[in-house]
Every structure is written in structure tokens, then in C-alpha cells.
Image (spheres, coloured by chain):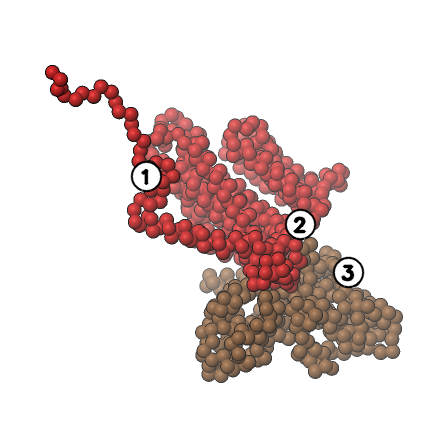
Chain colours: A brown, B red
Amino acid sequence: MKRTLLVSAVAIAGLAGMATAATLDDVRAKGFVQCGVSTGLVGFAAPDADGNWDGFDVAFCRAMAAAVLGDPSAVKFTPTTGKTRFTALASGEVDLLARNTTWTFSRDTDLKQTFVGVNYYDGQGFMTHASLGVSSAHELDGATICIQTGTTTELNLADFFRANSMSYEPVPIETNAEARQQYLSEACDVYTTDRSGLAATRASLENPDDHVVLPEIISKEPLGPLVRHGDDQWADIGRWVLNALITAEEKGITAANVVEMAAGTNDPEVNRLLGSEGDLGSMIGLNSDWAVHVISAGGNYGEIFERNIGSDTPIGLERGVNALWTDGGLIYSPPFR
Amino acid sequence: MAHSAFVRDGLIAPKPPPMTEVGAIGWMRANLFSGWLNSILTLASVAGTVFVFYELLPWMFQSSWTANSVAECRAAIAGAHGDGVNGACWAVIRERYLQLLYGFYPANMYWRPNLTFVLMLVALSPILFPNLPRKMLWFSAVYPFLGYFLLWGGTIWLPISILLGFVVGYFLIALNSARMGLLFGVISGAAGTVIYWIYIASWFAQVAHDLIPIGLTEVESARFGGFMLSTIIGVTGISCSLPIGIMLALGRKSDLLIVKSICVGFIEFIRGVPLITLLFVASTLLNIFLPPGTNFDLILRVVIMVTLFASAYLAEVVRGGLAALPTGQFEAADSLGLDYWKSMRLIVLPQALKISIPGIVSTFIGLYKDTTLVSIIGLLDPVGLTTSIRADSAWNGIVWELYAFVAAVFFVFCFSMSRYSMHLERRLQTDHN
């Protein structure tokens, strides 16, 4: 009985927390977007020497601030860990979470979050020493594998090896830094985590060519920004800011030419997006030139990708499945109409 | 008679002791090679030390201070010391040491934490060293408010207005205890202070600020990090937990049932849960329970939890000191006709605290190092910052250099605490051995 009471007290308190006024009004009133990011993940979120945050996820926070307040620097970042991120969002400490979080059923429904889309399609992969001469994950029978405990990667790994009736010996590790040391000292033959993480780790090794990332991807990890359940307008803004970034790449709108194109083009969808035709902005509660601010903040989806994690950066990720649908990838935006 | 017994008529000058018993050789025989087991241990330790330095020194000194990324570091070290040399990339410390010290505090305002730190030493000195003038204690009393104002900025009237709460309380106690007795006086003073803080303090600060606006640029808590954050949490926790801990220890030994049960319950509850649980409560649960829109600073929440945690442990350390004191001391105090507080203040506590010094300082050192746990709830203390710095693709892969720096700074702080405690023990040594 006492337990039920406590649980319902927590639930009521939680509801009270969620039933706050519209996030959009709150954000306008305080003049900045409070954005939950990672405490540090190569390419996705990291502070530089002056304390300015930068990265692929950070760029989305800045785009949101640009859309709502017209100023990409009107963001305050709250570093969150894997354990504190959802509570920080649910309790209203942050307005949105852009912290390479995998979109799963239970997080969407049970934890009462709303994922606004997918900004990076990741998947679990394997990295191994080139000297072992392994070219496929199906040759890993009997390998020792470094694996982060308590994550979905651990379960995916078990599933993959069972499905292929192979055996492996797990070496449990806590953090990426620890995994790196274990892997380098050859305490494990293979390191497995998300492929973006593998690429970043491989790039930081002394001789990246001595290590290969195997071609198999054994899980789906769609990473995306998320907001609280129950504020549809705010979720819509998040969703369409992301779609604006994607559509901008599709239509060739860049940070450099967005102002010029906002004056009017021959493409009606571009005109609707940038506000020179129609009135999409007011339907979502924003100014008509919201998308112009979004794109001038850090460029379109492709520009953000290339600058933070693309093939010219030390991390060197290929677009792969994260290419536009027109290039055979999965990145796709509904039309602006 | 020519033949007579030999009679010595003087002392023979003493011979110098054998070579093997004096000087360096004698010392080594006595201390290092006094038996086969000790000889083996000595040789093994020497071999171990030499090995560590042989491995460590080249790494430390065949290093790069000037590079701008890990790759440049490796190239610079290979260029200067030959291929395959494994050297430290101290360049990351050169680029980020300010961040590790101050977090994201605005660079043009570094003088504020610096000044706060220097003033902290000034405020602590009359407490730590009794031969300084006692008047300096007034500064120590005002310091917490001054430190808050310097670090967080904002209007100067808020700390002043909160400080005024104590003045209000003092006058209420003085006024009411003269008329209606001490107990009522104290109660009315405490109630008056709390009411003043809740309802009047912020209004007063606002009005005063409108009249005479004095203040510093506000710096939000999110910009606090690095050793500054550790020191704020550690020092506040240490200085608040000592009085609370002593009170809890006295409460636990008290004859008053309610006081005793509250103290025992508090101590056992806090000691029964890990610090990390309390930190999670501070960072996540409190958020859900507090009414929406409450902006209860995360650093403040963490400081409160850390203080409560340390108080419970200190209470037990002090209780150990109280228990070690012979009953005769308590009885002597009673027989002198001293009341409870006087006997505690003049006779019992000075002795009990002296006994507890090593335990108290251990708790303090532990508390200071425990502040690194806040990295788990997303605060960027030095350990949390190492992760963030590694997340910069220029420095991804640097581990030992960052940890070495953090460890070195922690060592300086903790070692000075430990030295001070030894100094204190020597100074308070009153037994005759």
C-alpha cells in the first residue's frame, strides 16, 4: 500500500512537471533554449578550449535556437550522462535532448518522450586488428570481445552470436577510453560499439591502418533529438527544423546562398520553406523567415555532417545510409507544403 | 720486587667503532640489510623503483608541449626522439589547463575565483593558526557571503540581505530572551530569521539594488567546472560538515530521547546509502518533486547532499573521540558546576576533538576526493572534463596525461591537508611522553 502511494506520488509529481505551459512560450520568455547534450562525444558534442560547444548534435540545438529566437548562440548546454538524460528532459531541466539517443519503442512510449526524427542512422559494428586477417564478423568464432556493460550493444552482440551459432568471450568495460586501452593492449581481439564511435576511436589510434572496421552492421541505432511528451507544438518545431535542414540539402540551399535564395526562386517549395511564398511560419508559431535562420546558423544537413563528422574530419565517416534518399540513403524529409 | 701485578693506570682511548657499524654502511646494515628477508625486500624495492623510473622518465620528458593535436604530438615526438618513442603529449595540458582549473568560467573574470581563493586562505588562517589576531574571525564569518558574491556575481545586496537575517535573529534573541526567557528567545530568533529570509530578503535586495545598483556580472552555475567546482563543493562541504557533525555526535550521546533518535536516525540513514545515490537524488529526483519552474541550483543541491553525507561520517568520528574520553572528565566538569554547554565547550570537546583529528582529516580528504563523483551526474569536475576534452577530435585518445595532471593537483591539495593535520597534532600534544 505504501509503495503504491509512493509510486503515485512520483507519478503525480511527474505529471505536474510535464503539464508546464507551452515550451515555446517558456523559451521565448527566458530568451534561450536549454539543450541537453552529451558530456563529450567525439564529433557529436564537445567543448573547445574556450568552452564553446560544437558538434553534430550541438548543431541541432543551435538550429532550434535560430528557428525560435533567430539567434543560433541563444543556447545553453546542459551536459548529461546516459543515466541523467531522460530525467533531465522529463523534469523540465532541459527543453530538448540532442544526445545521440537511440529511438526505441520503450523510450518513446514507456519513458514518455517524443522523438522528433532521426539525424543519424548508426549501427553496431566491430573493429579488429588487421594483423588477425579477419574480413567478416562471421569469422569471429571464439574471439574475445570488449563490450560496454549495461548497454543495448551487449544484448545485440549476444543475439548476433547466438543467431550464427558462434561463441565469444566478453571482456566487460565501462567507458570508451577503457575499451581503447584494453583493445590496444590486446586484452581483446575485437571492440564492438556503434560504428560512429568505432570510426572515431580508430581515427585516434597511432596507426589507423593497422585496424579494420568489419563490414557487418548487427543492429539498428537510429539516433535523434527528442522532446517531452505532451507538447505537440514544440515537438512539431523540432521535427520541422530537422526536416528543414534535410530539405535544404536536397534543394541545394546552403549557409552561403540562403539569404540570396530567400529573396525568391523558381522552386515553389524553396520559396515556401524560406518564407517568400505562403505562410508556413505562422502555422508552426514562428516567424516566416525561421528556416532562413535555421540554415544560416550552420548550413544544411549535409554541411553540418561534413563539418563535424564527415570524411574530411579526423573521424572521417562516409555518408553511407545517411545520404539523402535521392542518393540512395535513408535521409528523407516530408514536403513543405 | 720487580715482578708485580699489572695495574692499569689510565683508560685506553676508545677505538673507533668498526666500519660496518657506523656511517652509511652501518645505517644500511641496520635499516636495509638486517636479515636475509629484509635484504631481499630491499633489493626488490630498488629494482621496482628503478624499473618504474626507467619506464616513466623517458615518457615524461620525451614529450611535446607545443603541438595542437594528438597527431601533431606524435609527429613532433617521432621527429625529436626517433620513431617508435612513446612520449607524453603534454600539449593537451598546455591548451586546456585553464579549463581544467576553472571550467567554463569566463576568461576575463578569472580574477574573481582567484581572489575568492586567496580570500579563502585569509579567512581560514585565523581558524587554522591560533596565534593570528582574533579580530580576523569577523572576516571569516563574512567570507561565505563575499565568496558567493564574487563567484556568482549579481547584485551585492542579495548576500548582504541574507547576512542581515542573522542580525535580525540576533536582535530577536536578545530582545525576547530578556523578556520571556532563553528558550522562547532562541525559538523566536530562529523563526524570525527564516521568515525574513523567505518573505523579505529578496524584496529588500531588489529595492536596495534599485536604489544603489552595485554588482558584478552574473555567472551562471553551468559555467562552473574543473578544480574550481571541486574546491567549492569540497571546502563548503568541509566547513559546514564539521559543526553539523559535532552537533550530531553530541545529539547521539544525549539523554533527550527525541534529539537522540533524530540524530541516530539521520546518521544511520545517511551512512546506509552510498554518496552516489544521494547525488542522483540531488540531480534527478529533487527535480521531479519540486514544483515546476523552481530553479534550485544544481551545485547548491550537490553541496547540500555532500555536506549531509560528510556530517554523518564526521559525527561518528567525533563520537569515537567522545567515547575515548575517560568518564572522569565528564564527572569533573559536572562537579565544577558547569552547565551542559559549558562543560562540552571547555572540557569535553577540546579533548575529544584532539583525539579525533586524524579521523576528521581523513574524512575531509575523502570528501574532497569524493567530489569527483559529481561527474556521474553530468557536472564537469576535473574528471568529467577529461571526457569532454577527449571528445575534441584533436585530443581524442589522450588518457594518461590528463589523469596525471588531475592526480597531481589533487595530490597537492590532499597532501597539504594531511601535513596540516600532523602539524595540528604536534601543536596540541599535551601528554608527557
Percent from the top left, x then y, of residue A101? 61, 69
Say if A71 sits above or below B154 in the image: below
Write down the residue under mark 2: B105
Percent from the top left, x then y, of residue A107? 58, 71
**Label 2 crowding class (10 Å Cα cut-off): few <14, some 14-19, many 20+?**
many
In the image, which is nearer the foreground, mark 1 or mark 3?
1
The answer as to whether the residues below labels 2 and 3 share one chain is: no
Percent from the top left, x then y, of residue B53? 48, 52
Residue drawn at x 49%, y 64% is A4
**Label 1 crowding class (10 Å Cα cut-off): few <14, some 14-19, many 20+?**
few
Say if A58 sits above or below A128 in the image: above
Measure the alpha-carbon separation of dots 1 and 3: 82 Å
Q: In the rendered structure, find residue A57 and report the number of the disc placed on it.
A: none
Q: Chain of mark 1?
A: B
Q: Chain of mark 3?
A: A
Q: Chain of mark 2?
A: B
Amino acid type, mark 2: Tyr
Pick whichever, A58 or B21, lies toward us.
B21
Name the quarter where the C terminus of chain B is drawn: top left
Measure the alpha-carbon separation of dots 2 and 3: 22 Å
Amino acid type, mark 3: Asp
